[in-house]
Structure formats: structure tokens, C-alpha cells
Amino acid sequence: MTVASELSHYTSTDGDLAYRDLGTGDLVVLVHSGYADHRVFDEQIPALVSAGFRVVAPDVRGHGFSANASKPFRWADDLGGLLRHLDAGPAVLVGLCMGSAVVTDTVLEYPELVRAVVVCGAGTSAFEYADPWTLERAGESARMLAAGDLDGWVEAFGRNAAGPHRTVDDIAPDVVRRLREMAAHTISKHTAGETDWLTPLADPWSRVPKIEVPVLAVHGALDASDAIAMADRLAHTVPDGRSVTIEGVGHYPHMEKAEQFNEILLDFLRTL
């Protein structure tokens, strides 16, 4: 079965948005990291379904098998629209890096659709980067894309999954291969210099103390310091927040130590 045949599509006001929808029970929504797609959660989806949850895993607009934007859009409106289309919720929203921003935007804009939030590798959509490793990698990425070096960019994308404390040789080859495969697919949908239609929320951090649902931050201990700090800030700013660290992994703990990540997530879900 091909990936495309496993997907459903929601017709938004600006093209079709792809998602997987499996299982029955309380709803958990998994939102992937930048340049990836729903397949980044291949180890989480069956574990959650087996534990009695319904799982929806969308491809964020401009990623994976979802349409690119052709006019201004907000992450929260796309995810909120999908949940309303499914007549589903309130849901537990789980986000990785960019996905953390998506789910946090959504709980801020549509709190009635959310019963809890899990973030990993970021906090709100007001990203804050200061550590030299992250800034250097971002600069390298921008230079490669500007030069049209897509092969080099994809290679670097997988290498950067190691984070500042390891090399790519320290990561299971299959994890790196999967990340590069997803990134290559997403970047192929775009062209250099195209308009970025994403409309960010204004000052989301000022609204975080009003988030009333439980929030869990999951850190990879070897992730970049900015990524850990943003997720920690979210967990420490909301009224009901907590954090947990998985040792020996970086930005993708759910892939490197899937069983441990799944256990942490399921334990959190059982408290709700």
C-alpha cells in the first residue's frame, strides 16, 4: 500500500490537507516537525491505536502530501478547521518542533478544541534562537537553499538531527534515512524565493499563562539548548505544566527511543 492511499484529505479554503485517521477512543493529534510529515510518527501511531486512542496525524500545509499555501494562512486555523471537519475533540495535541508551535497556536486560538498539549523541541510559534550551533546550522541551510543545492541541503538536514553534542554516526541510520526522505519530498514542493504566506500569531508568549489545559514538555537531553529552553519555558509558564527528559537522544526522541517516548506519552494520557 502506498503512503498516498493511506491518507484522507480535508478540503480547506486553500487546497486539500492530508491526514491519517486511525483507531477509536479519545482523540490524540500528532503534528510533525518542519520539513517532515505524518510519517515521522510511524512508531507512535500504532502504539496509541493499540492503547485505545483515536489518532489523527495531519501533514501541515506546505509539507508532505498537503497543499501549499496560495494566500495568507494560520496554523491554528488549519488544525482547528480539520478538527471541526472531523467533528472531533477536544483532543490532546502533540507537537514536535514546528508542530509544537502549531499545537500551541491552536490551544491559544481554539481552547475549546483542546484538552491537553504535549510539546517537544519548541514552545510557541515565536521561536527564539540564540545558541551558536543552531544559528550556524540555520545559516548553512539558508545558503544551500539560496544556491539551489537541494542534495546538499537534504544531506545536512539528516546530519543536523545529531544536534550539537554528537555526529550523525551516533544516530541509527534508519532514522537519518527517514528524515532525509521526508525532507526531500517536502522541499521538492517549493521553489526558491516563493512567498511565505504563514501569518504568525502576535506575541503568543503573553497569552501562554492563560492556557488552562495540562501541558507536558518532552526533551531530548542532547538537543540544542534553544529547543529545550523553549519547551521548558512553555511548561513552566502555564498553570499546569511539567517536563521530562529522555537521555541519550536529540531533536527526535520519539524516533531514537520510540518505546520510552511512547511510554511517557501514554502515562501522561492516562492522567487526563
Image (spheres, helix red, strand yellow):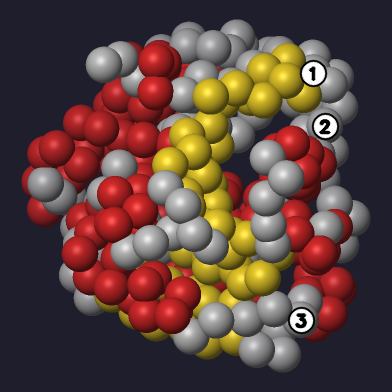
* Quadrant of image for the N terminus: top left
State the separation of the CA atoms marked 1 and 3: 31 Å
Asked whether the beta carbons under mark 1 and mark 3 sit within 8 Å of each other, the answer is no
Residue 14: which numbered mark, if any?
A: 1
Q: Where on the picture, by quarter, is residue 2?
A: top left
Badge 2 vs badge 3, beta-carbon distance below 8 Å: no
Q: Is residue 266 left or right of residue 178?
A: right
Direction front: furthest residue: 24
Q: Nearer the viewer, mark 2 or mark 3?
A: 3
In this rendering, the answer to whether 254 lies above or below 169 is below
On residue 120, the disc is: none
Name the residue located 49 percent from the left edge and 59 percent from the top edge.
25
Residue 212: assigned label: 3
* Rendered residue at 67%/18% (across/down): 16
Residue type of the residue flagged with mark 3: Glu
Give the residue displayed 74% in from the left and 36% down from the top: 85
Residue neighbourhood size for the residue with mark 2, other residues' Cα within 10 Å, grouped as few (<14), some (14–19), many (≥20): some
Q: What is the CA distance from the residue labelled 1 to the residue labelled 2?
A: 9 Å
Instruction: Give whichever of 35, 257 is nearer the camera.
Output: 257
Residue 73's label in the rendered image is: 2
Q: Earlier in the sequence, mark 1 or mark 3?
A: 1
Label 1: how many Cα within 10 Å (few below 14, some 14–19, many 20+): some
Kind of residue at disc 1: Asp
In the displayed structure image, the side of residue 46 where residue 146 appears, left or right: right
Residue furthest bottom as drawn: 239
Dot 1: element: loop
